[in-house]
Image (cartoon, rainbow, N blue to C red):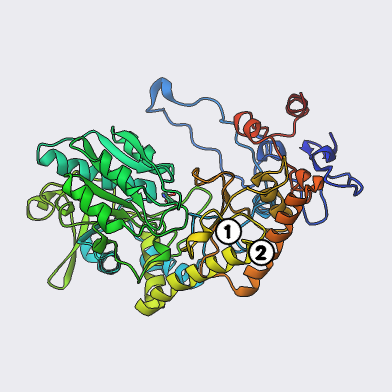
Amino acid sequence: MTMLKEGRPTAPQAVNEADSAPATVTGNRALMLEEALIFEIGSTDTTGVDFAEAPKVASRLGNLARTDGIGLPGLSEQETVRHYTRLSRQNYAIDLGLFPLGSCTMKHNPRLNEKVARMPGFADLHPLAPQSTVQGALAVIHELAQWLVTLTGMHSVAMSPKAGAHGELCGLLAIRSALEARGDARSVILVPESAHGTNPATAAFCGYKVEDIPATPDGRVDLEALKARLGPDVAAVMITNPNTCGLFEREMKTISDAVHAAGAFVYCDGANFNAIVGRVRPGDLGVDAMHINLHKTFSTPHGGGGPGSGPVVLSEALTPFAPLPFVEKQGDRFVLVEEETVEDHHASSFGRMVAFHGQMGMFTRALTYILSHGADGLRQVASDAVLNANYILRSLDDVLDAPFGGSGPCMHEALFSDKGLAEGFTTLDIAKGLIDEGFHPMTMYFPLVVHGAMLVEPTETESKAALDQFILALRSLAERAKAGDEALKGAPYFAPRRRLDETLAARKPVLTWTEGALAQAAE
Ligand SMILES: *Cc1c(COP(=O)(O)O)cnc(C)c1O
Protein backbone atom coordinates (compact mmCIF):
# COMPACT_ATOMS: atom_id res chain seq x y z
CA MET A 1 0.00 0.00 0.00
CA THR A 2 1.27 3.46 -0.84
CA MET A 3 1.40 5.99 1.95
CA LEU A 4 1.27 9.60 0.88
CA LYS A 5 1.64 10.87 4.38
CA GLU A 6 1.47 9.11 7.62
CA GLY A 7 -1.88 7.52 8.38
CA ARG A 8 -3.30 8.39 4.98
CA PRO A 9 -3.54 5.33 2.78
CA THR A 10 -4.22 5.60 -0.92
CA ALA A 11 -5.94 3.06 -3.08
CA PRO A 12 -3.69 0.57 -4.79
CA GLN A 13 -3.57 0.95 -8.57
CA ALA A 14 -4.48 -2.71 -8.98
CA VAL A 15 -8.12 -1.72 -8.64
CA ASN A 16 -7.88 0.50 -11.67
CA GLU A 17 -6.16 -1.76 -14.19
CA ALA A 18 -8.71 -0.32 -16.57
CA ASP A 19 -6.58 -0.26 -19.67
CA SER A 20 -2.99 -0.12 -20.73
CA ALA A 21 -2.50 3.42 -19.38
CA PRO A 22 0.46 3.60 -16.98
CA ALA A 23 -0.41 3.36 -13.30
CA THR A 24 -0.10 6.45 -11.10
CA VAL A 25 1.55 6.47 -7.69
CA THR A 26 -1.52 7.91 -5.98
CA GLY A 27 -4.11 5.70 -7.64
CA ASN A 28 -5.72 8.88 -8.99
CA ARG A 29 -6.42 9.10 -12.71
CA ALA A 30 -6.40 12.77 -13.65
CA LEU A 31 -9.73 14.18 -12.50
CA MET A 32 -10.88 10.79 -11.23
CA LEU A 33 -9.66 10.88 -7.64
CA GLU A 34 -9.44 7.89 -5.36
CA GLU A 35 -10.81 8.31 -1.87
CA ALA A 36 -10.26 6.19 1.21
CA LEU A 37 -12.83 5.70 3.96
CA ILE A 38 -13.30 8.60 6.33
CA PHE A 39 -12.14 6.32 9.15
CA GLU A 40 -8.87 5.81 7.29
CA ILE A 41 -8.13 9.45 6.50
CA GLY A 42 -9.23 10.85 9.86
CA SER A 43 -8.15 9.80 13.30
CA THR A 44 -9.84 9.87 16.66
CA ASP A 45 -7.19 12.05 18.26
CA THR A 46 -7.40 14.92 15.79
CA THR A 47 -10.22 17.39 15.41
CA GLY A 48 -11.11 20.22 13.06
CA VAL A 49 -12.70 22.28 15.81
CA ASP A 50 -11.43 22.91 19.35
CA PHE A 51 -14.09 22.75 22.01
CA ALA A 52 -13.58 23.74 25.62
CA GLU A 53 -13.34 20.75 27.94
CA ALA A 54 -16.88 19.77 28.94
CA PRO A 55 -17.60 20.42 32.62
CA LYS A 56 -17.73 17.32 34.76
CA VAL A 57 -21.29 16.76 35.93
CA ALA A 58 -22.88 13.82 37.63
CA SER A 59 -24.48 11.51 35.11
CA ARG A 60 -28.24 11.15 35.20
CA LEU A 61 -27.99 7.97 33.14
CA GLY A 62 -26.41 5.90 35.92
CA ASN A 63 -24.39 3.01 34.56
CA LEU A 64 -25.77 3.63 31.06
CA ALA A 65 -23.54 6.70 30.75
CA ARG A 66 -20.82 6.40 28.09
CA THR A 67 -17.32 6.33 29.48
CA ASP A 68 -15.26 5.93 26.29
CA GLY A 69 -15.20 7.84 23.02
CA ILE A 70 -17.19 6.38 20.15
CA GLY A 71 -14.34 6.40 17.67
CA LEU A 72 -15.50 9.08 15.23
CA PRO A 73 -12.69 10.27 12.98
CA GLY A 74 -11.64 13.91 13.23
CA LEU A 75 -10.78 15.89 10.12
CA SER A 76 -10.20 19.52 9.25
CA GLU A 77 -13.01 21.34 7.50
CA GLN A 78 -11.19 21.21 4.18
CA GLU A 79 -10.52 17.49 4.48
CA THR A 80 -14.17 16.90 5.25
CA VAL A 81 -15.39 18.97 2.31
CA ARG A 82 -12.94 17.26 -0.05
CA HIS A 83 -13.90 13.80 1.18
CA TYR A 84 -17.56 14.22 0.37
CA THR A 85 -16.97 16.20 -2.83
CA ARG A 86 -14.66 13.47 -4.12
CA LEU A 87 -17.21 10.80 -3.31
CA SER A 88 -19.98 12.79 -5.00
CA ARG A 89 -17.88 13.00 -8.18
CA GLN A 90 -17.81 9.22 -8.40
CA ASN A 91 -21.56 9.26 -8.73
CA TYR A 92 -23.95 9.86 -11.61
CA ALA A 93 -26.79 12.35 -11.26
CA ILE A 94 -29.73 13.74 -13.19
CA ASP A 95 -27.83 17.05 -13.27
CA LEU A 96 -24.97 15.34 -15.15
CA GLY A 97 -26.83 13.56 -17.88
CA LEU A 98 -29.71 11.45 -19.12
CA PHE A 99 -30.96 9.00 -16.53
CA PRO A 100 -33.05 6.53 -18.57
CA LEU A 101 -34.30 4.41 -15.65
CA GLY A 102 -37.65 2.99 -16.73
CA SER A 103 -40.39 3.04 -14.07
CA CYS A 104 -38.48 5.71 -12.11
CA THR A 105 -39.36 8.87 -14.07
CA MET A 106 -36.01 10.55 -13.52
CA LYS A 107 -36.77 14.02 -14.86
CA HIS A 108 -35.13 17.39 -14.43
CA ASN A 109 -35.80 19.00 -11.03
CA PRO A 110 -36.50 22.65 -11.88
CA ARG A 111 -34.44 25.12 -9.85
CA LEU A 112 -37.53 27.20 -9.24
CA ASN A 113 -38.90 24.31 -7.11
CA GLU A 114 -35.74 24.40 -5.03
CA LYS A 115 -35.88 28.15 -4.62
CA VAL A 116 -39.44 28.05 -3.32
CA ALA A 117 -38.80 25.10 -0.99
CA ARG A 118 -35.91 27.03 0.55
CA MET A 119 -37.94 30.17 1.31
CA PRO A 120 -37.54 30.62 5.08
CA GLY A 121 -41.31 30.73 5.58
CA PHE A 122 -41.46 27.14 4.31
CA ALA A 123 -38.02 25.75 5.13
CA ASP A 124 -37.85 26.89 8.76
CA LEU A 125 -41.26 25.66 9.89
CA HIS A 126 -41.68 23.48 12.91
CA PRO A 127 -44.30 20.74 12.61
CA LEU A 128 -45.73 21.66 16.00
CA ALA A 129 -45.99 25.40 15.31
CA PRO A 130 -49.43 26.81 16.20
CA GLN A 131 -51.75 26.56 13.21
CA SER A 132 -52.48 30.28 13.21
CA THR A 133 -48.78 30.91 12.46
CA VAL A 134 -48.49 28.46 9.54
CA GLN A 135 -51.56 29.32 7.49
CA GLY A 136 -49.46 29.67 4.33
CA ALA A 137 -48.01 26.19 4.67
CA LEU A 138 -51.43 24.68 5.31
CA ALA A 139 -52.72 26.56 2.24
CA VAL A 140 -49.95 24.94 0.17
CA ILE A 141 -50.94 21.46 1.33
CA HIS A 142 -54.60 22.24 0.68
CA GLU A 143 -54.00 23.65 -2.79
CA LEU A 144 -51.75 20.75 -3.82
CA ALA A 145 -54.41 18.34 -2.56
CA GLN A 146 -57.02 20.10 -4.73
CA TRP A 147 -54.80 19.73 -7.81
CA LEU A 148 -54.20 16.04 -7.15
CA VAL A 149 -57.90 15.35 -6.65
CA THR A 150 -58.79 17.31 -9.81
CA LEU A 151 -56.07 15.73 -11.99
CA THR A 152 -57.08 12.22 -10.94
CA GLY A 153 -60.86 12.71 -10.82
CA MET A 154 -60.95 11.16 -7.36
CA HIS A 155 -62.87 12.09 -4.21
CA SER A 156 -60.16 12.90 -1.66
CA VAL A 157 -56.45 12.57 -1.03
CA ALA A 158 -54.33 11.43 1.91
CA MET A 159 -51.24 13.62 1.76
CA SER A 160 -49.05 12.11 4.45
CA PRO A 161 -47.53 8.90 2.94
CA LYS A 162 -43.83 9.35 2.37
CA ALA A 163 -43.23 7.41 -0.85
CA GLY A 164 -44.94 5.20 -3.38
CA ALA A 165 -44.60 2.02 -1.34
CA HIS A 166 -45.85 3.86 1.76
CA GLY A 167 -48.81 5.05 -0.32
CA GLU A 168 -49.56 1.46 -1.31
CA LEU A 169 -49.62 0.60 2.38
CA CYS A 170 -51.99 3.52 3.03
CA GLY A 171 -54.31 2.43 0.22
CA LEU A 172 -54.42 -1.20 1.33
CA LEU A 173 -55.02 -0.20 4.96
CA ALA A 174 -57.99 1.91 3.81
CA ILE A 175 -59.29 -1.01 1.75
CA ARG A 176 -58.87 -3.40 4.67
CA SER A 177 -60.70 -0.99 6.98
CA ALA A 178 -63.56 -0.63 4.50
CA LEU A 179 -63.91 -4.39 4.18
CA GLU A 180 -63.75 -4.93 7.94
CA ALA A 181 -66.32 -2.17 8.46
CA ARG A 182 -68.81 -4.15 6.41
CA GLY A 183 -67.87 -7.36 8.24
CA ASP A 184 -66.28 -8.90 5.18
CA ALA A 185 -62.55 -9.30 5.90
CA ARG A 186 -61.00 -10.94 2.84
CA SER A 187 -57.63 -12.64 2.45
CA VAL A 188 -56.28 -12.37 -1.10
CA ILE A 189 -54.79 -9.58 -3.22
CA LEU A 190 -54.35 -10.17 -6.94
CA VAL A 191 -51.24 -8.67 -8.56
CA PRO A 192 -50.24 -8.89 -12.25
CA GLU A 193 -47.01 -10.70 -13.11
CA SER A 194 -45.43 -7.51 -14.42
CA ALA A 195 -46.01 -5.53 -11.20
CA HIS A 196 -43.31 -3.59 -9.37
CA GLY A 197 -41.95 -5.58 -6.43
CA THR A 198 -43.42 -3.16 -3.92
CA ASN A 199 -46.98 -4.27 -4.86
CA PRO A 200 -46.75 -7.89 -3.67
CA ALA A 201 -44.46 -6.82 -0.82
CA THR A 202 -47.02 -4.31 0.48
CA ALA A 203 -49.88 -6.79 0.17
CA ALA A 204 -47.89 -9.42 2.08
CA PHE A 205 -46.89 -6.84 4.70
CA CYS A 206 -50.60 -6.13 5.25
CA GLY A 207 -51.12 -9.82 5.92
CA TYR A 208 -52.73 -10.70 2.58
CA LYS A 209 -52.01 -13.72 0.46
CA VAL A 210 -50.68 -12.59 -2.92
CA GLU A 211 -51.69 -14.30 -6.14
CA ASP A 212 -50.38 -13.58 -9.65
CA ILE A 213 -52.55 -12.60 -12.58
CA PRO A 214 -50.95 -13.67 -15.87
CA ALA A 215 -50.26 -11.30 -18.76
CA THR A 216 -51.50 -11.69 -22.32
CA PRO A 217 -48.92 -12.08 -25.13
CA ASP A 218 -49.35 -8.37 -25.88
CA GLY A 219 -48.15 -7.40 -22.38
CA ARG A 220 -51.43 -6.51 -20.66
CA VAL A 221 -53.47 -7.99 -17.83
CA ASP A 222 -55.26 -11.18 -18.89
CA LEU A 223 -58.86 -10.06 -18.33
CA GLU A 224 -60.38 -13.54 -18.60
CA ALA A 225 -57.89 -15.02 -16.12
CA LEU A 226 -58.59 -12.14 -13.74
CA LYS A 227 -62.36 -12.54 -13.99
CA ALA A 228 -62.05 -16.27 -13.43
CA ARG A 229 -60.09 -15.72 -10.20
CA LEU A 230 -62.36 -13.07 -8.66
CA GLY A 231 -64.38 -14.40 -5.75
CA PRO A 232 -65.50 -13.75 -2.17
CA ASP A 233 -61.93 -14.12 -0.81
CA VAL A 234 -60.40 -11.38 -3.03
CA ALA A 235 -59.97 -8.07 -1.20
CA ALA A 236 -58.40 -6.06 -4.00
CA VAL A 237 -56.57 -6.08 -7.30
CA MET A 238 -53.42 -3.97 -7.61
CA ILE A 239 -52.93 -2.74 -11.16
CA THR A 240 -50.31 -0.41 -12.61
CA ASN A 241 -51.60 1.82 -15.38
CA PRO A 242 -49.81 2.55 -17.67
CA ASN A 243 -48.24 -0.78 -16.81
CA THR A 244 -44.57 -1.60 -16.32
CA CYS A 245 -44.28 -2.80 -19.94
CA GLY A 246 -45.00 0.82 -20.89
CA LEU A 247 -48.50 -0.03 -22.16
CA PHE A 248 -51.86 1.45 -21.29
CA GLU A 249 -54.31 -1.06 -19.81
CA ARG A 250 -57.12 -0.41 -22.26
CA GLU A 251 -59.57 -2.68 -20.45
CA MET A 252 -59.17 -0.82 -17.16
CA LYS A 253 -62.84 0.15 -16.87
CA THR A 254 -64.00 -3.40 -17.61
CA ILE A 255 -61.49 -4.69 -15.05
CA SER A 256 -62.76 -2.24 -12.39
CA ASP A 257 -66.39 -3.12 -13.08
CA ALA A 258 -65.64 -6.83 -12.70
CA VAL A 259 -63.65 -6.26 -9.49
CA HIS A 260 -66.42 -4.12 -7.98
CA ALA A 261 -69.08 -6.63 -8.98
CA ALA A 262 -67.12 -9.22 -6.98
CA GLY A 263 -67.15 -6.92 -3.93
CA ALA A 264 -63.43 -6.10 -4.13
CA PHE A 265 -61.50 -2.84 -4.54
CA VAL A 266 -59.19 -1.55 -7.26
CA TYR A 267 -55.79 -0.27 -6.16
CA CYS A 268 -53.91 1.49 -8.93
CA ASP A 269 -50.14 1.89 -8.75
CA GLY A 270 -49.85 5.45 -10.04
CA ALA A 271 -46.07 5.55 -10.39
CA ASN A 272 -46.51 5.91 -14.16
CA PHE A 273 -48.96 8.81 -13.92
CA ASN A 274 -46.42 10.96 -15.80
CA ALA A 275 -47.59 9.36 -19.04
CA ILE A 276 -51.25 10.33 -18.61
CA VAL A 277 -51.35 13.36 -16.31
CA GLY A 278 -53.84 15.87 -17.73
CA ARG A 279 -55.12 13.30 -20.25
CA VAL A 280 -56.68 10.44 -18.26
CA ARG A 281 -58.45 10.65 -14.89
CA PRO A 282 -58.04 7.37 -13.00
CA GLY A 283 -61.30 8.13 -11.16
CA ASP A 284 -63.14 7.72 -14.48
CA LEU A 285 -61.66 4.23 -14.79
CA GLY A 286 -63.11 2.99 -11.51
CA VAL A 287 -59.98 3.22 -9.37
CA ASP A 288 -60.56 3.23 -5.58
CA ALA A 289 -57.09 4.18 -4.39
CA MET A 290 -53.92 5.28 -6.19
CA HIS A 291 -50.62 6.63 -4.95
CA ILE A 292 -48.94 9.46 -6.79
CA ASN A 293 -45.16 9.63 -6.59
CA LEU A 294 -44.55 13.38 -6.32
CA HIS A 295 -40.87 12.53 -6.77
CA LYS A 296 -41.62 11.07 -10.18
CA THR A 297 -44.53 12.78 -11.91
CA PHE A 298 -44.17 16.14 -10.20
CA SER A 299 -40.39 16.49 -10.53
CA THR A 300 -39.31 16.52 -6.91
CA PRO A 301 -35.82 15.05 -6.53
CA HIS A 302 -35.27 11.40 -5.71
CA GLY A 303 -32.62 8.76 -5.62
CA GLY A 304 -30.09 7.81 -3.01
CA GLY A 305 -32.81 6.79 -0.60
CA GLY A 306 -35.09 9.75 -0.54
CA PRO A 307 -36.93 11.85 0.23
CA GLY A 308 -40.04 10.71 -1.56
CA SER A 309 -43.67 11.66 -1.21
CA GLY A 310 -46.61 9.43 -2.06
CA PRO A 311 -50.04 11.05 -1.56
CA VAL A 312 -52.92 8.61 -2.10
CA VAL A 313 -56.08 9.67 -3.91
CA LEU A 314 -59.20 7.86 -2.76
CA SER A 315 -62.67 7.09 -4.10
CA GLU A 316 -65.81 8.14 -2.25
CA ALA A 317 -66.15 4.60 -0.85
CA LEU A 318 -62.70 4.72 0.77
CA THR A 319 -62.68 8.37 1.88
CA PRO A 320 -64.18 7.76 5.36
CA PHE A 321 -61.24 5.45 6.13
CA ALA A 322 -58.47 7.87 5.10
CA PRO A 323 -55.61 8.48 7.53
CA LEU A 324 -55.30 11.59 9.68
CA PRO A 325 -54.38 14.35 9.68
CA PHE A 326 -55.75 16.30 6.73
CA VAL A 327 -56.04 19.96 5.93
CA GLU A 328 -59.47 21.48 5.58
CA LYS A 329 -60.62 24.96 4.63
CA GLN A 330 -63.07 26.33 7.19
CA GLY A 331 -64.24 29.78 6.11
CA ASP A 332 -61.05 31.66 5.30
CA ARG A 333 -58.86 29.59 7.66
CA PHE A 334 -56.97 26.39 6.95
CA VAL A 335 -57.32 23.83 9.71
CA LEU A 336 -55.27 20.73 10.30
CA VAL A 337 -57.87 18.19 11.31
CA GLU A 338 -56.44 15.87 13.95
CA GLU A 339 -57.96 12.98 15.85
CA GLU A 340 -60.06 15.15 18.17
CA THR A 341 -62.54 16.14 15.49
CA VAL A 342 -62.62 12.76 13.83
CA GLU A 343 -66.36 12.23 14.24
CA ASP A 344 -67.13 15.16 11.96
CA HIS A 345 -64.88 14.11 9.12
CA HIS A 346 -63.15 10.85 8.38
CA ALA A 347 -65.48 8.99 10.68
CA SER A 348 -63.71 5.67 10.32
CA SER A 349 -60.09 6.78 9.84
CA PHE A 350 -57.70 3.87 10.21
CA GLY A 351 -55.23 6.09 12.09
CA ARG A 352 -52.02 7.84 11.12
CA MET A 353 -49.29 6.99 8.62
CA VAL A 354 -46.69 9.40 9.99
CA ALA A 355 -46.03 11.54 13.03
CA PHE A 356 -46.82 14.87 11.35
CA HIS A 357 -48.16 16.03 7.98
CA GLY A 358 -45.97 14.37 5.34
CA GLN A 359 -43.10 15.68 3.24
CA MET A 360 -43.60 19.44 3.38
CA GLY A 361 -40.51 20.17 1.27
CA MET A 362 -41.84 17.92 -1.48
CA PHE A 363 -45.27 19.56 -1.31
CA THR A 364 -43.82 23.01 -1.96
CA ARG A 365 -41.69 21.66 -4.83
CA ALA A 366 -44.58 19.75 -6.43
CA LEU A 367 -47.00 22.68 -6.19
CA THR A 368 -44.35 24.99 -7.68
CA TYR A 369 -43.96 22.58 -10.59
CA ILE A 370 -47.72 22.32 -11.08
CA LEU A 371 -48.29 26.09 -10.98
CA SER A 372 -45.35 26.85 -13.26
CA HIS A 373 -46.71 24.44 -15.89
CA GLY A 374 -50.39 25.19 -15.46
CA ALA A 375 -53.08 22.74 -16.54
CA ASP A 376 -52.15 22.97 -20.24
CA GLY A 377 -48.46 22.52 -19.44
CA LEU A 378 -49.11 19.35 -17.43
CA ARG A 379 -51.06 17.93 -20.35
CA GLN A 380 -48.09 18.72 -22.58
CA VAL A 381 -45.77 16.88 -20.13
CA ALA A 382 -47.63 13.63 -20.75
CA SER A 383 -47.65 14.06 -24.54
CA ASP A 384 -43.96 14.90 -24.73
CA ALA A 385 -42.97 12.04 -22.41
CA VAL A 386 -44.86 9.60 -24.64
CA LEU A 387 -43.45 11.15 -27.83
CA ASN A 388 -39.87 10.86 -26.52
CA ALA A 389 -40.32 7.22 -25.54
CA ASN A 390 -41.76 6.36 -28.95
CA TYR A 391 -38.87 8.17 -30.64
CA ILE A 392 -36.48 5.86 -28.77
CA LEU A 393 -38.58 2.77 -29.46
CA ARG A 394 -38.74 3.40 -33.21
CA SER A 395 -35.12 4.52 -33.48
CA LEU A 396 -33.85 1.24 -32.03
CA ASP A 397 -36.39 -1.45 -32.87
CA ASP A 398 -34.34 -2.48 -35.91
CA VAL A 399 -31.34 -3.43 -33.72
CA LEU A 400 -33.02 -4.38 -30.43
CA ASP A 401 -36.00 -6.71 -30.02
CA ALA A 402 -39.08 -4.72 -28.92
CA PRO A 403 -41.40 -7.47 -27.69
CA PHE A 404 -44.55 -5.33 -27.73
CA GLY A 405 -43.43 -2.91 -30.44
CA GLY A 406 -45.69 -4.60 -32.96
CA SER A 407 -48.87 -3.81 -31.06
CA GLY A 408 -48.58 -0.06 -31.59
CA PRO A 409 -47.01 2.94 -29.83
CA CYS A 410 -45.78 2.67 -26.24
CA MET A 411 -46.61 5.08 -23.45
CA HIS A 412 -43.79 6.80 -21.54
CA GLU A 413 -41.20 4.01 -21.65
CA ALA A 414 -39.73 1.78 -24.34
CA LEU A 415 -39.19 -1.89 -23.55
CA PHE A 416 -36.56 -4.08 -25.26
CA SER A 417 -35.45 -7.67 -24.67
CA ASP A 418 -32.13 -9.51 -25.08
CA LYS A 419 -33.47 -11.63 -27.94
CA GLY A 420 -31.06 -11.63 -30.86
CA LEU A 421 -27.86 -10.80 -28.97
CA ALA A 422 -24.92 -13.09 -29.80
CA GLU A 423 -24.54 -16.30 -27.80
CA GLY A 424 -23.27 -15.47 -24.30
CA PHE A 425 -24.07 -11.74 -24.50
CA THR A 426 -26.56 -10.28 -22.09
CA THR A 427 -28.48 -7.19 -21.09
CA LEU A 428 -25.85 -6.65 -18.40
CA ASP A 429 -23.12 -6.26 -21.07
CA ILE A 430 -25.11 -3.51 -22.75
CA ALA A 431 -25.81 -1.79 -19.41
CA LYS A 432 -22.11 -1.83 -18.48
CA GLY A 433 -21.21 -0.53 -21.92
CA LEU A 434 -23.56 2.41 -21.38
CA ILE A 435 -21.54 3.40 -18.30
CA ASP A 436 -18.43 3.76 -20.49
CA GLU A 437 -20.47 5.90 -22.89
CA GLY A 438 -21.30 8.22 -19.97
CA PHE A 439 -24.89 7.19 -19.35
CA HIS A 440 -26.59 5.71 -16.33
CA PRO A 441 -27.89 2.32 -17.49
CA MET A 442 -31.57 1.83 -18.16
CA THR A 443 -33.69 -0.30 -15.82
CA MET A 444 -32.73 -3.90 -16.56
CA TYR A 445 -34.24 -7.33 -15.96
CA PHE A 446 -37.54 -5.62 -15.04
CA PRO A 447 -40.37 -6.25 -15.74
CA LEU A 448 -39.88 -9.98 -15.29
CA VAL A 449 -42.35 -10.89 -18.04
CA VAL A 450 -39.72 -10.03 -20.68
CA HIS A 451 -36.43 -11.94 -20.97
CA GLY A 452 -33.40 -9.73 -20.29
CA ALA A 453 -35.65 -6.65 -20.16
CA MET A 454 -34.23 -3.18 -20.89
CA LEU A 455 -36.74 -0.55 -19.84
CA VAL A 456 -35.92 2.95 -21.09
CA GLU A 457 -37.78 6.04 -19.86
CA PRO A 458 -36.44 9.26 -21.34
CA THR A 459 -39.08 11.61 -19.80
CA GLU A 460 -40.25 14.81 -21.43
CA THR A 461 -37.38 16.91 -20.14
CA GLU A 462 -34.73 15.55 -22.54
CA SER A 463 -33.99 17.41 -25.75
CA LYS A 464 -33.92 15.71 -29.15
CA ALA A 465 -30.14 16.19 -29.22
CA ALA A 466 -29.79 14.33 -25.89
CA LEU A 467 -32.06 11.52 -27.11
CA ASP A 468 -30.10 11.24 -30.37
CA GLN A 469 -26.82 10.86 -28.51
CA PHE A 470 -28.29 8.20 -26.23
CA ILE A 471 -29.78 6.35 -29.22
CA LEU A 472 -26.39 6.45 -30.96
CA ALA A 473 -24.70 4.94 -27.90
CA LEU A 474 -27.32 2.25 -27.34
CA ARG A 475 -27.37 1.38 -31.05
CA SER A 476 -23.62 0.89 -31.16
CA LEU A 477 -23.70 -1.29 -28.02
CA ALA A 478 -26.56 -3.38 -29.44
CA GLU A 479 -24.60 -3.87 -32.66
CA ARG A 480 -21.49 -4.91 -30.71
CA ALA A 481 -23.50 -7.36 -28.58
CA LYS A 482 -25.07 -8.85 -31.70
CA ALA A 483 -21.70 -9.15 -33.44
CA GLY A 484 -20.22 -10.89 -30.40
CA ASP A 485 -17.58 -8.21 -29.70
CA GLU A 486 -15.73 -9.82 -26.76
CA ALA A 487 -14.36 -6.46 -25.59
CA LEU A 488 -17.88 -5.48 -24.50
CA LYS A 489 -17.79 -8.18 -21.85
CA GLY A 490 -15.02 -6.27 -20.06
CA ALA A 491 -17.01 -3.03 -19.75
CA PRO A 492 -16.95 -0.70 -17.95
CA TYR A 493 -13.34 0.25 -18.69
CA PHE A 494 -13.47 3.93 -17.75
CA ALA A 495 -15.52 3.95 -14.53
CA PRO A 496 -13.96 4.34 -11.06
CA ARG A 497 -14.47 0.58 -10.63
CA ARG A 498 -14.53 -2.22 -13.19
CA ARG A 499 -17.26 -4.84 -13.44
CA LEU A 500 -17.92 -6.28 -10.01
CA ASP A 501 -19.31 -9.62 -9.02
CA GLU A 502 -22.58 -7.97 -8.01
CA THR A 503 -23.80 -10.79 -5.79
CA LEU A 504 -20.52 -10.92 -3.92
CA ALA A 505 -20.38 -7.12 -3.72
CA ALA A 506 -23.84 -7.08 -2.11
CA ARG A 507 -23.20 -10.00 0.23
CA LYS A 508 -19.59 -9.28 1.20
CA PRO A 509 -18.93 -5.62 0.45
CA VAL A 510 -15.30 -4.54 0.62
CA LEU A 511 -15.43 -0.95 1.81
CA THR A 512 -11.90 -0.41 2.97
CA TRP A 513 -8.43 -0.33 1.48
CA THR A 514 -6.70 -2.09 4.33
CA GLU A 515 -4.36 -4.78 3.13
CA GLY A 516 -6.28 -7.46 4.99
CA ALA A 517 -9.56 -6.62 3.26
CA LEU A 518 -7.91 -6.51 -0.14
CA ALA A 519 -6.25 -9.86 0.43
CA GLN A 520 -9.59 -11.30 1.51
CA ALA A 521 -11.32 -9.91 -1.57
CA ALA A 522 -8.65 -11.40 -3.80
CA GLU A 523 -9.27 -14.90 -2.40
C1 LIG B 1 -41.27 3.70 -8.07
C2 LIG B 1 -42.35 2.72 -8.15
C3 LIG B 1 -42.99 2.26 -6.99
C4 LIG B 1 -42.53 2.58 -5.58
O1 LIG B 1 -42.44 3.92 -5.30
P1 LIG B 1 -41.39 4.45 -4.20
O2 LIG B 1 -41.67 5.90 -4.13
O3 LIG B 1 -40.04 4.12 -4.72
O4 LIG B 1 -41.68 3.75 -2.92
C5 LIG B 1 -44.07 1.41 -7.13
N1 LIG B 1 -44.47 1.01 -8.36
C6 LIG B 1 -43.88 1.42 -9.50
C7 LIG B 1 -44.40 0.95 -10.82
C8 LIG B 1 -42.78 2.28 -9.43
O5 LIG B 1 -42.17 2.68 -10.54
Position of residue 498 in the picture relative to residue 125 (left or right): right
Asked whether the beta carbons under mark 2 and mark 1 sit within 8 Å of each other, the answer is yes
Q: Amino acid at mark 1?
A: Pro
| Residue 323 seen in the figure | no
Position of residue 189 in the picture relative to residue 485 (left or right): left
Q: Secondary structure at mark 1?
A: loop
| Residue 401 seen in the figure | yes
Q: Can you give x and y, in whole percent of width and height, for residue 89 in the image?
A: 68, 55
Q: Residues within 10 Å of mark 1 (few under 14, many from 20)?
A: many
At 66% across and 64% down in the image, what residue appears?
470
Q: Can you give x and y, in whole percent of width and height, for residue 442 in the image?
A: 59, 54
At 42% across and 20% down in the image, what residue appears?
63
Q: Residues within 10 Å of mark 2 (few under 14, many from 20)?
A: many
Q: Which is nearer the eye, 185 or 292?
A: 185
Q: Residue furthest left?
A: 343
Q: Can you give x and y, in whole percent of width and height, for residue 137 in the image?
A: 30, 66
The image quadrant where one finds the N terminus is: top right
Q: Quadrant of residue 135?
A: bottom left
Location of mark 1 (residue): 100
**Which label is found at residue 145?**
none
Q: How many marks?
A: 2
Q: What's the CA distance linking mark 2 and mark 1?
A: 9 Å
Q: Is residue 68 above or below residue 460?
A: above
> Which is more N-terminal, label 1 or label 2?
1
Q: Can you give x and y, in whole percent of width and height, for residue 349 in the image?
A: 16, 47
Q: Amino acid at mark 2?
A: Phe
Location of mark 2 (residue): 470
Q: Which is nearer the eye, 286 or 225?
A: 225
The image quadrant where one finds the C terminus is: top right
Q: Secondary structure at mark 2?
A: helix
Q: Quadrant of residue 375?
A: bottom left
